[in-house]
Amino acid sequence: MILVVGAKGMLGQDLMRVLPGDVRGVDIGEIDITSAESVRRVLLTLKPRVVVNAAAYTDVDGCETNVELAMKVNGEGVGHLAAVTKELGALLVQLSTDYVFDGGKGSACGEDDPVNPLSVYGRSKLLGEENARTNPDHLIVRTQWLYGLGGKNFVETMLRLAKERTELAVVDDQIGSPTWTVDLALAINELIDNGRRGTYHAANSGFCSWYGFAGAIFAEAGVPMKVRPQTTEELGRPAPRPLYSVLDCGKLSRDTGLVLEQWREALKSYLAKRREAGMN
């Protein structure tokens, strides 16, 4: 049985749909990953063969002022999962982020490149990676710029703002790969199915800036909107972000044969799903 922790989240919902066979999900109210006792009770009762941890505190700016909570959820909580999955002989799949890098390389980051998180969020996720590795049977999947039907994300924010404004300023000096949660869930399934272990990068192929992403969203959705570029400094967010954090996903394709679709094609698929779901 595969257990998805954080099953009601944006990625968790797609994992529940994509992963095959006996898949169960738990979320807040059923499990508290910051509590070793709660994790132990749930996992020893269900005895999964694979645990996919999609639970996280993902408010990047909020982490800067809620340091203890970020470390508990994103770091220590993973340690609790690692301890019990190790005891059960189960695989722990831990989701991580491009924010473990500082963005200074200037080209795509590989799995073995040096990590140097700039923010509390990045540090907390790096702690989660370190704790996941305490279970030798682990799989760490780093990804970035997620969007999906099941939660708040950049695509939905842009489409909502388009109903309220005629012009938007969007950051143009942060570069990454927008990634659809359905495609990420497919990559996770391939890695599990192929018996892969260790650290992998998984993101839709190609890259753009947030400004470029916003322009594509409005173009593909047929929404008129004037978008102007701005710098990260002009935006003035509390948490520092890596400016170039594209992930090299070559290891994923070499080891599984899977190449995730180009980010703009994935965006088209997502917008089509939104229309099917009656979202406007």
Image (cartoon, helix red, strand yellow):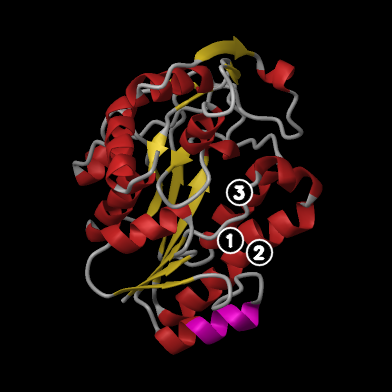
**Do residues under tags 1 and 2 come within 8 Å of each other at their CB atoms?**
yes
Instruction: Say which of 39 and 275 sits in front.
Output: 275
Location of the C terminus by quadrant is top left
Q: What stretch is highlighted in magenta?
A: 36-42
Camera-side mark, 1 or 3 = 3
Which residue carries the number 2 mark?
76
Q: Distance between the residues labelled 3 and 2?
A: 15 Å
Q: Considering only order in the chain, which callout, 2 or 3, is on the residue closer to the N terminus? A: 3
Q: Which residue is drawn at 66% across and 50% down?
A: 124
Which residue type carries mark 1? Asn
Inspect the magenta stretch and tell me whether residue 92 lies in it: no
Q: Mark 1 points at which residue?
A: 131
Q: Which mark is residue 69?
A: none
The residue lying at 64 percent from left, 35 percent from top is 116
Is 90 in front, or is 151? 151
Q: Is residue 37 magenta?
A: yes
Answer few, some or many: residues within 10 Å of disc 3's Cα (few below 14, many 20 plus, some between 14 and 19).
some
